[in-house]
């Protein structure tokens, strides 16, 4: 009985050894959707993000309204974490971005300033 | 996000396993629960092949590929297989015990394979989509099926590789459905499931016939080959084609020895799946067909009708896609040089052959898989296992001829192993995989000596 169990024990131990070794080295990391949001801290490669959506059904009305109020260049694109974002890229500096956000808030939007995805 | 997607992929592959178990019941059955456990990898690959071929047919017929339609497809396959198995007299074992004998040698090699598969899983979990063909058309096709439901007329006409059948994109779209989003990062793990399923299928099929010391080392050799380590999880059709091709080659080889009908049924299914994965599948499966016909030429009346019928059914299962290409006026993927164009490019023949041979035997790509195959064939032939040795020899010679033809018949391909310019390295994968699964039975024939006749 013991001799029969030994090969299975070898398999079980080897199956557990690798994950345990990985876990001992700081654990397994699972990326979060928030990791695709890079809050703007410095000038260059900035965009104003009006919102993130799981489908175009949610994103399209926001895009339409942004274009209607005159935010030309706003578009829908993947954010790299499985979501669609409605964003206006091409903002050169933090100062310009903050001015834009203030303007957008006056017409009912609440965008965030982010660095465009690397 | 990643954990949620992984859970979705586990659900999808459990579903494929369940479908495959039903297909296994239909074509073969099992005498004990332990035997079912041993053949679970084979059952999984049967499930992948049967579901893949069915999904391609549904897409061609204009059906939308939704989660519901995929589940319904599996249900239909499972019920049909169950009824077929019942009709031919298969039944479930009465006992409940699950006993699988595991030797110390098998446990040691199995432990290595487990650690390897865990490391491969870890490398694939957060892998980026960098491979050119993957992001150029394999994954976009999968995304198009996922988002639009079917084969969008304009999108599929404008992408490169339009003649490639949509088995892989169909699985990618199905994986997206199970993951809940078009997660092209975690999608790499679907190809991990295919690869590990293939390895366990081979081990399960061969372990009753082959001593562990002759079975495991060739499999581990393939697993650690540089090309496999670097590319096995690519979101493309190459490796799944290699896996289907190798399983078809193995089952055809086993059938030549012991003539069991389920082995030929498996050849049909895996051949159809291979031809539904990439257009090269037709060429590769022709190599197996001709090799099997030549190796069985002493029993023409008994074996040729069965082989020809099996080939006809396999090709018939892929006809809907060929008709679809014709109806939509899409490229059929024929040779660039045309039928007689080979003669106009005769100067490419020798360099093409040299390229095919050197890629097959390149240590930095496939380690010593090809030389080991030649030694195994020689050893089996010397031990008197002439049929298996002849079959394997013809598979090697015909496959290298086929690889040569590809470079020769497409004059735009430069003579190079550079993956971005010539697909020769990816092509040779099919022979490396087929060699790996044929080496153990060949070596076993040689081990058992003259007069054994085979491995059974």
Image (cartoon, rainbow, N blue to C red):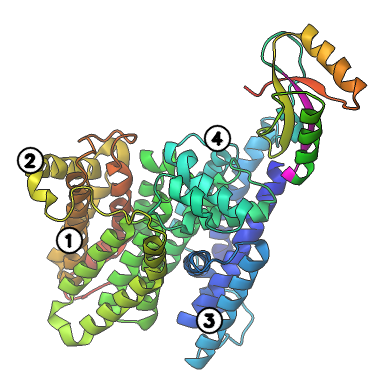
Parent chain of label 1: B
Q: Pick whichever of labels 1 and 2 is earlier in the sequence.
A: 2
Q: Which residue is mark 2?
A: B347
Mark 3 closeness class: few <14, some 14–19, many ≥20 residues within 10 Å: many
A105 w.r.t. B6: above or below: above
Q: Pick whichever of labels 4 and 3 is earlier in the sequence.
A: 3
Residue at mark 1 to residue at mark 3: CA–CA distance:
35 Å
Q: Position of residue A83 (x, y in %)?
A: 71, 38
Q: Quadrant of the C terminus of chain B?
A: bottom left
Parent chain of label 4: B
Q: Which residue is mark 3?
A: B81
Q: Please indicate whether residue B258 sits to the left or right of residue B195 in the image.
A: left
B275 w.r.t. B317: above or below: above
* Disc marking residue B393: 1
Q: Pick whichever of labels 2 and 3 is earlier in the sequence.
A: 3
Query: Which of pointers 2 and 3 indicates the residue nearer the eye?
Result: 2
Q: Position of residue A45 (x, y in %)?
A: 66, 15
Q: Quadrant of the N terminus of chain B?
A: top right
Give me the residue at 53% from left, 71% from top. B20
Q: Position of residue A100 (x, y in %)?
A: 82, 15
């Amino acid at each position: 009985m013991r001799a029969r169990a030994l090969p299975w024990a070898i398999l079980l131990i080897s199956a557990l050894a690798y994950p345990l070794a990985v876990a001992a080295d700081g654990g397994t990391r699972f990326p979060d959707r928030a990791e695709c949001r890079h809050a703007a801290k410095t000038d260059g490669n900035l965009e104003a993000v009006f919102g993130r959506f799981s489908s175009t059904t949610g994103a399209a009305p926001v895009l339409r309204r942004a274009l209607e109020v005159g935010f030309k260049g706003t578009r829908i694109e993947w954010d790299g974490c499985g979501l669609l974002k409605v964003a206006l890229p091409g903002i050169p500096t933090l100062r310009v971005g903050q001015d834009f956000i203030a303007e957008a808030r006056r017409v009912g939007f609440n965008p965030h300033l982010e660095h465009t995805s690397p | 996000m990643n954990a949620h997607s992984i859970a979705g992929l586990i659900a999808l592959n459990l579903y494929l396993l369940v479908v495959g178990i039903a297909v296994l019941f239909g074509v073969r059955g099992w005498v004990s629960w332990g035997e079912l456990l041993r053949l679970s990898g084979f059952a999984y690959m049967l499930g992948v092949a049967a579901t893949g071929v069915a999904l391609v047919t549904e897409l061609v017929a204009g059906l939308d590929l939704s989660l519901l339609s995929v589940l319904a497809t599996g249900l239909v396959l499972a019920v049909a297989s169950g009824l077929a198995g019942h009709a031919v007299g298969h039944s479930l074992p009465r006992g409940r015990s699950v006993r699988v004998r595991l030797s110390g040698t098998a446990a040691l090699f199995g432990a290595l394979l487990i650690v390897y598969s865990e490391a491969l899983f870890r490398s694939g979990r957060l892998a980026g989509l960098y491979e050119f063909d993957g992001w150029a058309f394999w994954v976009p096709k999968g995304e198009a099926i996922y988002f639009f439901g079917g084969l969008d007329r304009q999108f599929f006409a404008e992408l490169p590789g339009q003649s490639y059948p949509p088995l892989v994109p169909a699985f990618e779209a199905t994986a997206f459905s199970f993951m809940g989003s078009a997660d092209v990062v975690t999608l790499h793990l679907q190809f991990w499931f295919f690869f590990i399923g293939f390895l366990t299928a081979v081990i399960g099929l061969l372990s009753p016939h082959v001593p562990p010391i002759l079975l495991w080392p060739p499999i581990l050799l393939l697993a650690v080959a540089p090309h496999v380590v670097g590319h096995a999880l690519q979101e493309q059709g190459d490796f799944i084609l290699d896996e289907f091709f190798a399983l078809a080659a193995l089952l055809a080889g086993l059938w030549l020895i012991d003539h069991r009908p389920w082995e030929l049924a498996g050849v049909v299914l895996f051949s159809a799946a291979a031809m539904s994965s990439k257009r090269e599948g037709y060429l590769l499966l022709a190599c197996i067909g001709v090799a099997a016909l030549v190796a069985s030429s002493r029993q023409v009346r008994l074996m040729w009708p069965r082989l020809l019928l099996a080939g006809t059914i396999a090709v018939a299962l892929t006809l809907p896609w060929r008709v679809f290409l014709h109806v939509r006026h899409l490229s059929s993927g024929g040779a660039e040089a045309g039928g007689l164009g080979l003669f106009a490019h005769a100067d490419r023949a020798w360099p093409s052959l040299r390229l095919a041979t050197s890629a097959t035997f390149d240590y930095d790509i496939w380690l010593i898989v090809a030389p080991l195959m030649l030694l195994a064939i020689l050893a089996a032939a010397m031990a008197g296992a002439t049929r298996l040795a002849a079959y394997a020899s013809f598979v090697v010679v015909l496959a290298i001829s086929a690889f040569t033809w590809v470079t020769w018949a497409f004059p735009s391909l430069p003579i190079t192993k550079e993956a971005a310019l010539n697909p020769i390295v990816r092509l040779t994968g099919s022979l490396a995989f087929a060699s790996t699964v044929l080496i153990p039975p060949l070596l076993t024939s040689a081990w058992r000596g003259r007069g054994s006749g085979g491995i059974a």
